[in-house]
């Protein structure tokens, strides 16, 4: 279970990642950002890697919980829209999580971090699979490609949208641009 203080540290770490990249996220810089001593940070986390891992693990579990809580709708198209509205709302309020996943050099850091990022992708796939599969079974979504291939296209489009938003310095309304992307994806995957 993540503590309130750890959540605050993660948010500050995300802010540093946003402004300074992975190299700017140091315990010294984090302590200065939070007006703590370095020792105070170390009481909550052993290392920068542990902070990043906790951030990614929190994102995966939070996403799983949020998406599991969505009402199951009988219309797959509406279900897909609800999944992405939920994600876009969350990221618009917490852009530092986008930064954690898209920081330069982060994926090259180590296997634990790569595994944590893959867990996030797995959680997305877990929630997309029944929606896409149902849509294919009901004749609403194309069956010209498999459910998994359709999910890969959707996740790829969403990841590109998040990457673009981060590259623009979060200066556009991600909820608006993200929903445009989902509407475009729906045009592609509809039967």
Image: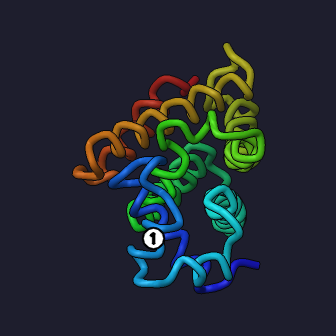
Please give the name of the residue rendered at 47% of the width and 84% of the height, measured from the top-left corner: 36
**Residue toward you, 111 or 154:** 111
The residue under label 1 is 12
Picture coordinates of residue 159, whole percent (x, y):
50, 37
**Residue placed at 63% from the left, 22% from the top?**
142
Question: From what the image shows, is residue 175 above or below residue 35?
Answer: above
Q: Position of residue 146 (x, y in %)?
A: 74, 21
User: Which x, y percent locates residue 20?
Assistant: 36, 52
Q: Quadrant of residue 181?
A: top left
Q: Please say whether residue 176 is visible from this viewpoint.
A: yes
Residue located at (76% from left, 39% from top):
111
Q: Quadrant of the N terminus?
A: bottom right
Residue 47 point in image, percent of width and height: 66, 63
Q: Residue placed farthest to the top in the image?
A: 144
Apparent side of residue 140 relative to residue 31 in the rendered image (left or right):
right
Q: Is residue 155 left or right of residue 16?
A: right
Q: Secondary structure at mark 1?
A: helix
Residue in view at x 71 percent, y 69 percent: 46
Of residues 156 and 45, the one nearer the viewer is: 45
Q: How many marks?
A: 1
Q: Is residue 64 visible?
A: no
In the rendered image of this protein, does residue 6 appear above or below residue 97? below
Closer-to-camera residue (13/150): 13
Above/below status of 148 relative to 114: above
Mark 1 nearby-residue class (10 Å; few <14, some 14–19, many ≥20): some
């Amino acid at each position: 279970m993540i503590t309130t203080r750890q959540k605050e540290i993660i948010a500050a770490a995300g802010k540093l990642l946003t402004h300074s990249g992975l190299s700017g996220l140091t315990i010294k810089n984090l302590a200065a950002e939070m007006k703590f001593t370095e020792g105070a940070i170390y009481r909550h986390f052993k290392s920068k890697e542990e902070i990043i891992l906790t951030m990614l693990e929190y994102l995966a579990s939070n996403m799983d919980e949020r998406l599991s809580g969505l009402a199951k709708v009988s219309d797959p198209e509406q279900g897909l829209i609800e999944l992405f509205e939920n994600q876009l709302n969350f990221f618009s309020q917490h852009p530092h999580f986008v930064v954690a996943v898209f920081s330069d050099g982060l994926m090259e850091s180590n296997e634990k971090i790569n595994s944590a990022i893959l867990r996030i992708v797995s959680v997305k796939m877990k929630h997309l699979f029944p929606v896409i599969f149902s849509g294919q079974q009901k004749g609403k979504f194309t069956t010209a490609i498999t459910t998994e291939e359709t999910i890969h296209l959707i996740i790829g489009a969403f990841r590109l949208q998040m990457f673009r938003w981060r590259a623009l310095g979060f200066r556009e309304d991600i909820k608006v641009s993200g929903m445009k992307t989902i509407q475009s994806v729906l045009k592609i995957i509809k039967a």
